[in-house]
Image: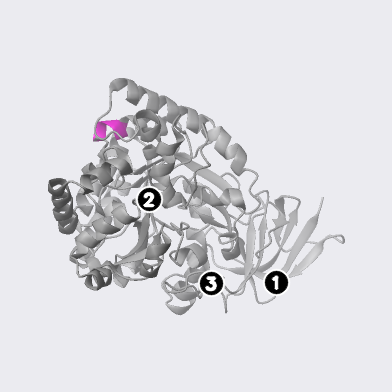
Amino acid sequence: MARILFSGGTIVDGTGMPPRRGDLLISGATIAETGSFETPADARVVHCDGLVVAPGFIDSHSHSDLQVLENRREKVAQGVTAEVVGNCGFSTYPAPANLKLLRDFSNGIFCGNQDWGWPTARAYLDRAARSAATTVFSLVGHGTLRIACAGNRLGPLAEQDLDWMEQMVSESLQQGACGLSTGLMYAPGGTAPFKELERLCQVVARYGKVYATHMRDYGDHLAEAVDEQLELARRTGCRLQISHLQAVGPRNWDKQRAVLDRIENAAANGVDVGFDCYPYTQGSTVLTQLLPQWALEGGMDGLLARLLDRVERTRIAIETDGGLAQGWAGILISSVESPRNRGLIGKSVAAIANDRAREPVETVLDLIREERGRVNILEINQSEANLRQTLTHPLACIISDGFYVKGRPHPRLYGTFPFLLGEICREYRWLTLAEAVHKVSDKPARRFGMEKRGRLEKGFFADLVVFDPKTVNSPATYENPAMAPVGIRHVFRNGAEVDLN
């Protein structure tokens, strides 16, 4: 059994305890010793003088569901050894008989083609277990469940449909899914009534798994959205994880402190609640998320038909314009499907509208028609002060929320974790190194039930990253996101060194 000694480094063990000088020995796939011990004569030595040895980072909110199967290296190059996919209601299973329904629903987030879909959690996880990059954990997506059960139908479902979804959640959790996710700003899942969510969360609670939610609103109705999710947790006893918590748009920035107070109060009174956040003020999603959900009845075909109806189009335009918290100058195009519109990537909706001599909301509806909905965006969402407030909060895990696009992705896909260690910790000093590492290792591992991962501790899996604390950072920008991080020296997963290139 191969033994590797990491010699002379600074150990940041993931628990939040202060860094300490010491050695670490791995034997096969596990950690054999840490601290001070007799060095085995046959051990390969990795000299770590001046470097930090930390647990492999865990990206607990990822959308790399398909790319992990392709052994992509964007995450592992940052020091990530495990990630949780299936977020925001989007999972690759359970696939409906008509696979096109699922692919049309998910490909804007998954950057997929027309050749994927698995019938069960076990089928997907068995395939993902062969990933040469990261260890994959998966949530079953509520939106995918709805698509498999009822297609693009909106609103309450029949009792037999709810029974079927309950059974599928139960089977998925038995087969290894680590919880359930909802995407309550994406049709059709976002039209589910409270009672439907309550029934599914009761199943999650019975298995002691996580319920992760992209809530119904992060802007004007942020408080109401948080209250709904806290009430679900109170009634069902599920472990609630609020996804990418933030207050979107300047008119809502002052609401964040109040919702944090609500979350803290719930936690103090026995609700098992946490949240996650990414270390950037801009977010990213699909353009159709800005539309009223009723407009997506019948999926993309239904939406495109409504956009050809003058009355329906006017109604969609009015509701979209009125609900936008960021302003059209704060919405930038990051990806389109057709070559003819590639020149729009990087431009704001406001600028494109000016070039086309159209109203911004009409420009958005035009683009959706031209691209059949396959448009991704960046959003200037939150203030730096609010970002610091969430990143440093004791209930927060730190995530990438990264996903691939056919264009210009968010820089978080390439740089979240080195950016956290360099810019946020070393330069801004918002967090200590030990605090930051804890929020991307032991904390998410415990939150999502990842046994023997997230710490540098004897008997744990030998997932670890070696980096230079003086140089680690990400040069990725919004204008040029596909930039490899700097300062990451070695990454090991299950005791084997991972190729970073």
Dot in front, 2 or 3 = 3
Kindly indicate the quadrant of the structure image that contains residue 428: bottom left
Coordinates of residue 286 in the picture (x, y in percent)? 35, 55
Label of residue 483 in the image: 3
Packing grade of label 2 (10 A; few <14, some 14-19, many >=20) is many
Left or right: 337 as drawn, with respect to 37: left
- The residue range painted magenta reads 194-198
The three-letter amino acid code for the residue at tag 2 is Gly
Quadrant in the rendering for residue 161 = top left
Expressed as whole percent of the image width and height from the top left, the position of residue 239 reads 39, 41
Q: Is residue 195 magenta?
A: yes
Query: Which residue is found at the position 39% from the left and 27% from the top?
Result: 166
Q: Amino acid at mark 3?
A: Met
- Name the mark on residue 48: 1
Are the two marked residues, 2 and 1, in contact with CB atoms closer than 8 angstroms? no
Relative to 237, say whether 435 is above or below: below
Q: Is residue 188 visible?
A: no
Q: Tell me the CA gap for discs 2 and 1.
A: 34 Å
Label 1 Cα neighbours within 10 Å, binned few <14 / some 14-19 / many ≥20: many
The residue under label 2 is: 274
